[in-house]
Image (cartoon, grey):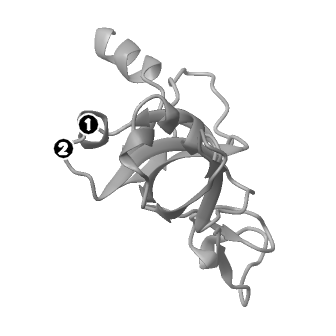
């Protein structure tokens, strides 16, 4: 029970950098798919000046989605190639390749964004990450759209 509580309370889970949904099982639970509105994802922020790697980083990451956390190397500043943050992304949002913000002097700072994982969503059924031949809405002949 202690391990179950730990798993259920920690919130975000990734397997192979892809989010997974964990729910407690009960005998009478409904085996229906939840309507997923958002997913956690690791994002790399390239060309970010070092002065923004502290308290400003959650605000900058917040331009993409809800900031969750930084990885250890970003927090400790042991690898300065890019800042790596986890953000909660809405499944239907556009994912920009670049964001811009103003620094303390009013100058526009532009940084490049790289997503370590992108959601694949089918056009007809709006389902996510299932095989097209198993789609109940008949996606045969419909291409999957990588959310970007």
Residue ID at (69%, 53%): 91
In which quadrant is the C terminus drawn? bottom right
Label 2's element?
A: loop
Residue ID at (75%, 57%): 92
Residue 36 visible in the shown view: no
Task: Give whichever of 88, 26 is nearer the camera.
Answer: 88
Residue ID at (64%, 38%): 31
Image coords of residue 53 (percent x, y): 40, 39
Is 143 drawn above or below residue 125 in the view shown?
A: below
Mark 2 neighbour class, 10 Å CA radius: few under 14, some 14 to 19, many 20 or more: few
Residue underneath mark 2: 78
Q: Are marks 2 and 1 in contact (CB under 8 Å)?
A: yes
Residue ID at (67%, 46%): 106
Image coords of residue 3 (percent x, y): 30, 16
Residue underneath mark 1: 72
Chain-order first, disc 2 or disc 1 = 1
Total tally of numbered discs in the picture: 2
Is 29 drawn above or below residue 2 in the view shown?
A: below
């Amino acid at each position: 029970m202690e391990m179950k509580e730990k798993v259920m309370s920690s919130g975000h889970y990734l397997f192979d950098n892809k989010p997974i949904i964990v729910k407690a099982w009960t005998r009478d639970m409904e085996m229906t798919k939840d309507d997923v509105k958002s997913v956690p994802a690791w994002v790399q922020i390239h060309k970010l000046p070092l002065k923004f790697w502290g308290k400003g980083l959650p605000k900058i990451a917040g331009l993409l989605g809800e900031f969750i956390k930084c990885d250890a190397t970003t927090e400790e500043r042991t690898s300065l190639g890019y800042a790596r943050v986890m953000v909660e992304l809405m499944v239907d949002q556009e994912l920009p390749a670049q964001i811009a913000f103003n620094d303390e002097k009013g100058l526009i700072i532009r940084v490049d964004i790289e997503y370590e994982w992108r959601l694949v969503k089918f056009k007809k059924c709006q389902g996510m990450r299932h095989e097209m031949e198993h789609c109940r809405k008949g996606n045969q002949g419909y291409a999957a759209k990588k959310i970007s």
